[in-house]
Image (tube, rainbow, N blue to C red):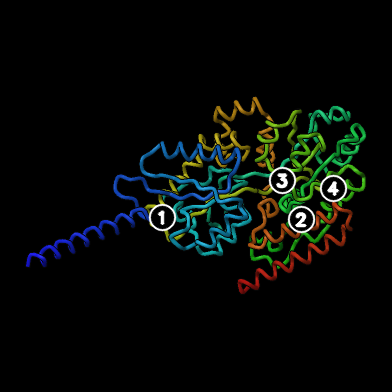
Amino acid sequence: MMKKFFALIMASLLVILAGCGSNQTSSTEKGSTSKKGEKQVVTFWHSMSGVPQETLNSIVEEYNNSQDKVQVNAEFQGTYEESLPKFHSVGGTKDAPTMIQVQEIGSMSMINSGNVEPIQKFIDAENYDMSGLEENIINYYKVDDKFYSMPFNSSTPVMYYNKDAFKKAGLDPEKAPETFEEVEEAGKKIVKSNDQMKGFALQAYGWLFEELLANQGGLLLNNDNGRTGTPTAVEFDNEKGKSILEWAKRMTDAGTFANYGTNSDNMLSGFLAGDVAMFLQSSASSRDVIDNAPFEVGVAFLPHPEAEERQGVAIGGASLWMSSGKEEAEQNAAWDFMKYLQTPEVQAKWHVGTGYFAINPAAYDEQVVKDAYKEMPQLQVSVQQLQATKPSFATQGALMDMIPAERKIIESALETVYNGGDVDEAFNSAVEQVNAAIEQSNAARGK
């Protein structure tokens, strides 16, 4: 009897211990509801590196310290191109992050995945006012009159130029070239004044092609850039599209073009080393370029052909997406953090610390921004360019899940021209390949 009694006691203890162990495991599982008194954990996947990552980490830390209900864990997941496939591999499972930063051209891929919770749900629940955010930014992220994601880090390309090289060439350093033709002429004068320096560089990058097209009012895809229906063909098969390749060809033939291919790091290094006087790149590079140049840097609007009026730029960068299937408390915590990121104070810190736009234009009235503009007035140029943009389907930007493939095709076409290839052949081949990619994408979704 005594043995049976002790056996029963031991069995009961084992059951209790097993139960405690089970509870302990479930409370630490990813995405689970936090215990009473503990912070709700939000897992935030992002693709910021370098200075932007330092600024983001600082903002996250300040948010976590500002309240006692939410703990945001920011986790770097590599580039946009690397993080999006990671999300798709875990989307809809417990391993998915609470929220993820996704490049603008990944928007339709995220929507089509079915693994996101549109933030419109949270906007409607509390009548959150999005109208205070920058109009030309929210225009991109509004799809079918609905917000699927929250705009965050937004940028557009600008032209950077070496003011010292302009002076040496007899050019006005305070008046940057505005048209393709003016860039060409400035390039010739720069090369004439310094045979070790090229005039202009254009990275073989599909995004820059799209922006130069939009600045002419040109559409990338039909059906109003995919805004009024799923695209079925390209819309850039015209002189506006071809003009960009012809521009590069003329400068290549004139010996004023610096060919860095698809390598943006080499292009930036070439500019800082005085090997090239002008180049196009994201406004998010402003702090990096200005802080590291051993000469005075000018920042200017994107050029356009003189035969076309400037229309403006489409938004680049990324937005924040909410995973579906997460518990209500976890999603609400992520929504609270998203709203925090839009406040003028936070956006002011983000803008000054990185060069990305302030999503909330009220940030430009913050003292930290006014002080930064006095010290570095070049930071204002991208904001002025964005706010001068004329709203249209062209400047709203194209929507389709095959745009990453389109960019690769355009990059190959640009590199072909840079290396002496025929413009018509490269352009016509690109049109055919992008049309094929559109057809394949539609077929895959039963369109």
Does 313 sit above or below residue 437? above
Q: Earlier in the sequence, mark 1 or mark 3?
A: 1
Q: Which residue is mark 1?
A: 30
Q: Splitting the image into 4 quarters, where does residue 167 fall? A: top right
- Name the amino acid, label 4: Ala
Dot 1: element: loop
Q: Earlier in the sequence, mark 3 or mark 2?
A: 3
* Camera-side residue of 255 and 324: 255
* Camera-side residue of 113 and 198: 198
Instruction: Look at the image and tell me in which quarter the N terminus lies.
Output: bottom left
Category of crowding for the residue at label 4, using alpha-carbon neighbours closer than 10 angstroms: few (below 14), some (14–19), many (at least 20): few
Report whether 275 appears left or right of 65: right
Dot 4: element: loop
Say which residue appears at 51% left-offset and 47% top-offset: 130
Q: Earlier in the sequence, mark 1 or mark 4?
A: 1
- Name the amino acid, label 3: Gly
Count of marks overlaid on the render: 4
Dot 3: element: loop
Report whether 255 appears left or right of 152: right
* Camera-side residue of 171 and 128: 171
How far, Cα to Cα, is label 3 from label 2? 22 Å
Residue 58 location in percent, x, y? 50, 36
Q: Which residue is mark 2?
A: 411
**Can residue 15 be spotted in the picture?**
yes
Q: Which residue is mark 4?
A: 307
Residue 107 location in percent, x, y? 59, 57
Dot 2: element: helix
How far, Cα to Cα, is label 2 from label 4? 25 Å
Q: Which residue is mark 3?
A: 312
Residue 334 location in percent, x, y? 44, 49
Q: Earlier in the sequence, mark 3 or mark 4?
A: 4
- Name the amino acid, label 2: Glu
